[in-house]
Image: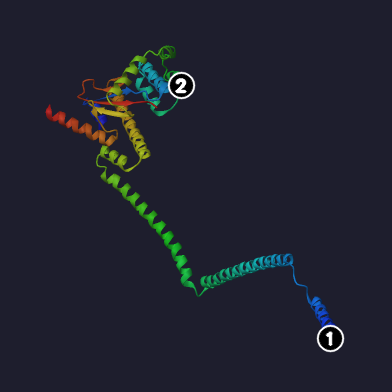
Amino acid sequence: MLLRMGLVLVSASLLLAACTSESDEPPPSSAQMAEGQQEESAMAYEAGESESAEQESEVEAEQSGEALQEEAERVPAQGGDGQGDTDAVVAQSGDGEGAEQAVQESQAEDGQEEQERVPAQGGDGEGETEQVVSQGGDEEDVAAQGGDGGEAEAMVGMIIESGHRAGLIANRNVVGNPDAPIVITEYSDFL
Amino acid sequence: MIEELVRTGVARFEYSHIINHGRPSMLGALATECGGDQGAWWSFHDHYMSQWDFSREGAIAYAASLSLDTEEFTQCLDSEKYLELVEGQHRQAVADGANRTPTVRINGEGAAIVADALIEQVLTLAAELEAEG
């Protein structure tokens, strides 16, 4: 009898213990465990994004901060303390302009030298023409030839007029003494 | 100076046609030669050196302004009476190496086209001739 009552008590206590454990939390199944892992990973991803977004915003903030700092450093530098930087920038631009000016001046000087050289070398006209051709391009060559042609034509006109005035032979394309020892021939086109 | 040399009979000046610009060049040359039939060769030469109307009508109008016989002039021009002469001068100029205009020769030798240099060459040659003769 006592043995039976002991067994009942033990079973009753076991039941009580079982009831109390069921009320706390049931043991998770494998499916529940998998879902939980996904939720954790998703949360972790979201957390990662937010972390990376935070990091980016921090980086941007740092960068903007640096930029602002730099600007803030620059502005006073231009205005006052950092005159070294400003001066350097101005000096650089000044150097650039100066360099360009120097180049232009040197080119101008070269041009002047060339211009001075041509008449200086031009003792006789033919030499002058050849030097202009060698110094200049085709355009200068053509221009020089055109100018020379104009001079030659003007000279031809003077010769013709003088020939007419002097009553010399002006037979078609010939002016002057038919027996003259020197014959100047011009080959030309009216155009 | 060259005027003086021409005037005194030391030098003679000749003009030779080159046709570098086709029909207008040819018309100017032919009109000049036709003007030469009536003693106006150099007038046409000077005319064409100073203006750029190389039309048939312009040539006839200029002939009329010189009081030339325009009928004779027009017939000469339209018949291309001096075509062979002009073409012959052009061929000769090319054969002489006149590859640009103007080209100047003194006694057939290359000469400067700049007036001062040309005068210098003529004077030098005149001095040489005088020394020889």
Q: Residue furthest front?
A: A1
Provide the secondary structure element on which disc 1 rests.
helix
Residue A48, image x, y percentages: 64, 67
Quadrant in which the C terminus of chain A is drawn = top left
**Dot 2 falls on which chain?**
B
Left or right: A84 in relation to B13: right
Q: Residue at x 56, y 70 (%)?
A: A66
Tags 2 and 1 in contact by the CB under 8 Å rule? no
Residue A160, image x, y percentages: 31, 26
Q: Amino acid at mark 2?
A: Ser
Q: Amino acid at mark 1?
A: Leu
**Dot 1 falls on which chain?**
A
Q: Is residue B132 depicted above or below A15 in this figure?
A: above
Residues B97 and A57: in front is A57
Residues A98 and A51: in front is A51
> Label 1 neighbourhood size at 10 Å, few (<14), some (14-19), many (20+)?
few
In the rendered structure, find residue A116 and report the number of the disc placed on it: none
How far separated are the C-alphas under marks 2 and 1?
152 Å
| Residue where numbered disc 1 is placed | A3
| Residue where numbered disc 2 is placed | B55
Residue A168, image x, y percentages: 27, 22
Q: Residue at x 44, y 12 (%)?
A: B71
Q: Residue at x 31, y 50 (%)?
A: A113
